[in-house]
Amino acid sequence: MEKSRHVLELLGKTRVVVENGEIIEIEEGEVDYCPLWHKMHGVEKLKEGAKWQVKRLMDEIGFCTEDREIEMDERIVTFGTSETIMTALENNELDISITVCDGAGTVLTSNPKIVQGIGGRLSGITETTPNKKIINKLEQKNAQTLDKPRIDQPAGLKKAIEQGYKKPAVTVSTVEDAVKCREISKEAVIFGVHLTGVNKKQTQKLIETCDVLSGCASKTIREIAGKKALLQAGRSIPIFALTKKGRNLTLDQAKKVQGPIYITQKNLPYLKDGNPPKPLQ
């Protein structure tokens, strides 16, 4: 196996470093408790949950190793970003996505199973070592990386536009990337993810540039973006659609939900009786 280093910020920005298939470092994040992880896995403390999740995925799908599985059919989170993009690709509402994968960096693909396979179980990757075996797997399944594999979402979007794609979606986790991506394309659907800890000024800029924002454990996104949203999905970890494009894609994803759905009109944000992460940042 090639030497590798992967730096993750997950579950309340808990920092986890994986080198050569082993967890070598884990640091306390900004959030102690997440209702979603408590509900799904019984996790009480996010630092412990982050270590458990990374180790589990390493064992089950080869996460952060050259044996990484890259496709997935199952939708895990009701209104997750990868789930929403997956559905939009299936419906031809999007023609390509730009997301991030361990061992490959920024990935461009029109394959819905790839989008869910690389993003549905774990994200928040801030640093990764490219792996030829993983990149070859992706290429065989209608996916591509940057010419110098790395994490660079604006560069991925620019490449998609240059290749003639008209309906791209791109995920961003910083204000700087959101602004750059909007400058590159007015038509791209921009999903803001992993935004715990953003301040009011940053949140305002995200509102101006993104189509969909995840509330994560952000107090300012709940307060500011929530008031600007056209649609809110969920209360504990709310998703805010800020544009008609974002709203339509979120509604399309709602059609994939198994079981009953309650829809009503409310002034947003609507967070009453929600069970938010603690503490909000």
Image: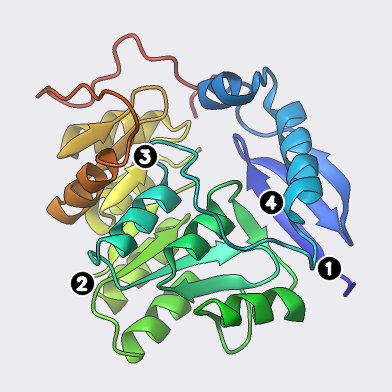
| Kind of residue indicated by mark 3 | Phe
Q: Quadrant of residue 250?
A: top left
* Amino acid type shown at disc 2: Lys
Q: Is residue 272 visible?
A: yes
Q: Secondary structure at mark 2?
A: loop
- Residue found 85% across the figure and 45% down from its top: 25
Counting residues from the start of the chain, the first of labels 2 and 4 encountered is: 4
Residue at x 48% of width, y 31% of height: 217
Q: Position of residue 7 (x, y in %)?
A: 73, 56
- The alpha-carbon separation of the residues under discs 3 and 2 comes to 24 Å
Q: CA distance from mark 2 to mark 1?
A: 36 Å
Write down the residue under mark 3.
79
Q: Which label was assigned to residue 8?
A: 4
Q: CA distance from mark 1 to mark 4?
A: 13 Å
Locate residue 19 relative to residue 157 in the image: left or right: right
* Quadrant of residue 104 within the rendered picture: bottom right
* Residue type at numbered disc 1: Ser
Q: Nearer the viewer, mark 2 or mark 1?
A: 1
* Label 1 sits on residue: 4
Whole-Å distance between the Cαs marked 4 and 3?
22 Å
Q: Earlier in the sequence, mark 2 or mark 1?
A: 1
Characterize the local packing of mark 1: few (<14), some (14-19) or many (20 or more) Cα atoms within 10 angstroms. some
